Image: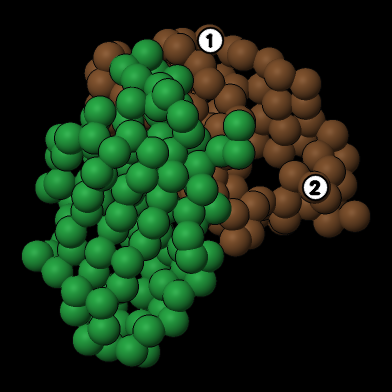
Amino acid sequence: QKEVEQDPGPLSVPEGAIVSLNCTYSNSAFQYFMWYRQYSRKGPELLMYTYSSGNKEDGRFTAQVDKSSKYISLFIRDSQPSDSATYLCAMSVPNNNNDMRFGAGTRLTVKP
Amino acid sequence: DAGVIQSPRHEVTEMGQEVTLRCKPISGHDYLFWYRQTMMRGLELLIYFNNNVPIDDSGMPEDRFSAKMPNASFSTLKIQPSEPRDSAVYFCASSPGTGDYGYTFGSGTRLTVV
C-alpha cells in the first residue's frame, strides 16, 4: 500500500461545477498538507498549504483535512477552464520538510 | 525573483550518451531537490541537498546517476551512460528550510533517450 493514495482520474466537469479532489494517507505522523497544481508541461506550483485538521479557504479553493480519517480534500468552487490541470496532494511530518510524499495526481478538465 | 531555473527545457539524446541537467535554485533557499516524473511512477525524489551538501541520495536509481552542487546557486544532475528507460521529466525544486514552506519547482527538463 502506498503511503499516499490519490485517484489519478481523469476527471471532467462542466464550467461552474464544484470539484472535489481527494487523497488518503496511512502515516499518522503527517501534519503538513499541501496541494500543488501542475499545468501541462510545467512544474508543480504550490496552491494550498494547511496544518493539521480543519479547513482553509483561499478564494474559490478550500482545503480540508480530516486527520481522524487520514483524508484530505481540495474543493474548487465555480470551476473555470483555467483550472484544468493535474492536482497533486503532498504531505510531510513536522520539521522534516525534506521528506515530502506526493500523491500520483488527479488530472482535471473543466469544459466551457 | 525568477524562480527555479532549469536548463535545457528539452533534451533528446542517443542511448549511451552522457546527459547533464542544470538547475539554479531561488536565492536564499537552503534546500535543493531533484525529482523525476513519469506517468507510471509519478514524482520520485532522486536526491536532495542542504547548504550544498548531499543529504539523501537513496532515490538515485543507479550508479549511472550523479548529482553535484558546487555552490549555492547551481546544481547538476548527470546521467552516464543514458538509457531509454531514463526518459522522463526531471524537476529541480528548492525550499527555504525546515519551516515546512513547501517547494518551488522549476519548469523541468523533458529528457528523451532514443
- Residue A66 appears at what percent x and percent y? 46, 17
Residue B39 visible to the viewer: no
Judging depth in this view, the residue of B15 and B28 nearest the camera is: B28
Residue B55 visible to the viewer: yes
Task: Determine the secondary structure under disc 1.
Answer: strand
Judging depth in this view, the residue of A19 and B96 nearest the camera is: B96
Q: Of all residues shown, which one is farthest toward the left?
A: B63
The residue at 67%/30% (across/down) is A75
- Residue B9 appears at what percent x and percent y? 53, 65
Residue B60 found in image quarter:
bottom left
User: Could you say which chain is coloured green in the image?
Assistant: B
* Marked residue chain, label 1: A
The residue at 72%/33% (across/down) is A76
Q: What color was chain A assigned in the picture?
A: brown
Q: Which residue is mark 1?
A: A54
- Residue B40 appears at what percent x and percent y? 37, 66
Separation of residues labelled 2 and 1 (CA atoms): 27 Å
Mark 1, Cα crowd under 10 Å, few <14 / some 14-19 / many 20+, is few
**Residue type, numbered disc 1:** Gly
* Marked residue chain, label 2: A
Tally the numbered discs.
Answer: 2
Residue A11 found in image quarter:
bottom right
State left or right for residue B84 relative to residue A86: left
Q: Of all residues shown, which one is farthest toward the front?
A: B71
Judging depth in this view, the residue of A74 and B92 nearest the camera is: B92
State left or right for residue B20 relative to residue A106: left
Residue B16 found in image quarter:
bottom left
Residue A82 is labelled as: 2
